Image (spheres, rainbow, N blue to C red):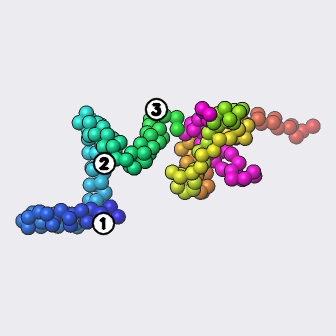
Amino acid sequence: MLDGVFVTVLAAITRVLPPTAQSGIEQLRDVPGLGVVVVVVVLLLTGMFVANVFGQWWLRQWDRLMGRIPIVKSIYSSVKQVSDTLFSSSGNAFREAVLVQYPRAGSWTIAFVTGRPGGEVATQLGGEHLSLYVPTTPNPTSGFFLMVPRADVVPLQMSVDEALKYIISMGVVAPPAPAVASAAPLPLRNRAG
């Protein structure tokens, strides 16, 4: 697939170049896997660009431009805020995996604790509640937000990564069962006597 995209980009480039340079570009079409290498190099260069001072300046200009477009402003700022929270290395977006009955009693699903309800919601709910994100399968980027009493939540010992693998695989890739402390083996009885 990446090679197909790469060939399309090469075709667009050859239209712009003079005929003397086109033969060298045409030879690149026959190199298998070159599209993958180009994508990796482009991602690496993009990361290096945004990690330095000049790249940070361009990102701030982009944010400022997006903040001035009337309809795009609200969508862009919301998506940026959510993605910054979810993908930040210091954030606690998904703190732990838990079991919760959803969508009805007796049906269980894995959810992720995202925090506690706050503000007016917390005062209206009363008691101790948790904010949960219930991802959909096999695409965990969409899901449901629930506020559930803490007493209705069953904590799991699996990591968030293990829970995500379990959800994405639709239950096929199950995490290993937690080690249960086993009782000391019973002594063997002496058969004589």
Q: Position of residue 151 (x, y in %)?
A: 73, 37
Which kind of residue does numbered mark 3 sit on? Answer: Ser
Kindly identify which residue carries mark 2: 43
Which numbered disc flags the more N-terminal residue, 3 or 1? 1
Instruction: Name the residue rendered at 39%, 45% in the picture.
Output: 73
Whether residue 107 is visible, yes or no, is yes
Instruction: Name the residue rendered at 30%, 43% in the picture.
Output: 65
Magenta residue check for 116 = yes
Kindly identify which residue carries mark 3: 90
User: Of the numbered discs in the image, which one, if any, rests on residue 178?
Assistant: none
The quadrant of the rendering that contains the N terminus is bottom left
Give the residues drawn in magenta, as a range: 94-120
In this orientation, which residue lies closer to the viewer: 133 or 176?
A: 133
User: Above or below — where is 175 with respect to 91?
Assistant: below
Give the side of residue 114 with respect to residue 23, left or right. Answer: right
Q: Position of residue 93 (x, y in %)?
A: 52, 38
Instruction: Tell me the quarter of the picture where residue 8 sits.
Output: bottom left
